[in-house]
Amino acid sequence: MSDKITLLTYGCNFKCKYCFFKPLAYKNLPIKELYKIIYNMMGEYELSRIMIAGGEPTLQEDLPGLTKLLDGKFYTILSTNGSHLLKIIDELKVNEVHVSLKAFNDKKHKILTSKSNNSTLEAIEYLGENKEDLGFKVEISTVLIPNIIEISEIDKIAKFIGEWDLPYHIIAHVPSKLKAPRPTKKLIEEAKKTSKKYLSKVSTSLESRKHIKGEKIII
């Protein structure tokens, strides 16, 4: 059994063409009530880590309050598109922040998400310039999509975050609504090799795809 729970928040300001998140049900819960549920599950399922994802969790006004309740009891990871991150970054109590950069080219980013990547790039730049003083780890990720987000785009992203040598994670696209194939192992390895021209720490979903599936629980 995995020691990590993933909390999916409702709502997002991006409309990603390959998004897997399809909420079947959701509830509005006060953060203290939600924390109580999570805390009880921690003991029952021997949990030690929590990833807060979505949707886009930074749109939730009470996210900082929840992270403060979790602080010291869970290893907390925030997964975000970065667009609203700078508005609440000083209020967060987390151990890691994972920022998903869909594309470096703004036109491609708009095609994939319907939004500009300006705010995401600004957030990454802030994280890079202040990484020694943040109090949490940072990771940037991109979904590798054949014929759309290819090696040339990965190269641009790696070069951009290479200024601060931020950890980079390359994720293989899983075919869904977007009509694009899954990248081959060779293409993923080539993307990693390209990224390592600029970065000291690059990982891919090839290394992390073997994971333990836990029980799905709808709160």
Image (cartoon, rainbow, N blue to C red):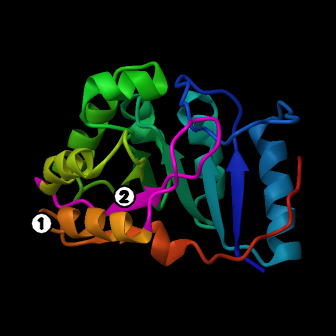
Q: Give coordinates of residue 27: x percent, y percent.
A: 86, 33
Q: Could you classify mark 1 by the number of other residues whose Cα lies within 10 Å: few (under 14), some (14-19), or many (20 or more)? A: few
In the rendered image, residue 183 lying in the magenta stretch gets the answer: yes
| Res. 116 visible in picture | yes
Q: Secondary structure at mark 2?
A: strand
Image vertical order of residue 52 relative to residue 60, above or below: below
- Determine which of the numbered discs, if any, sits on residue 28 in the image: none
Residue in front for this viewpoint, 43 or 197: 197
Q: Quadrant of residue 123?
A: top left
Q: Amino acid at mark 1?
A: Lys
Q: Is residue 2 left or right of residue 89?
A: right
Instruction: Identify the residue shown where x is 40% and y is 51%.
Output: 144
Q: Are marks 2 and 1 in contact (CB under 8 Å)?
A: no
Task: Please report the bounds of the magenta region as a residue range.
Answer: 163-184
Give the label on residue 139, or none.
2
- Residue 86 position in % (x across, y down): 36, 33
Q: Main secondary structure of the magenta part?
A: loop
Residue under pointer 1: 197
Q: Residue at x 85, y 34 (%)?
A: 26
Who's the residue at 26% across and 34% down the image? 121
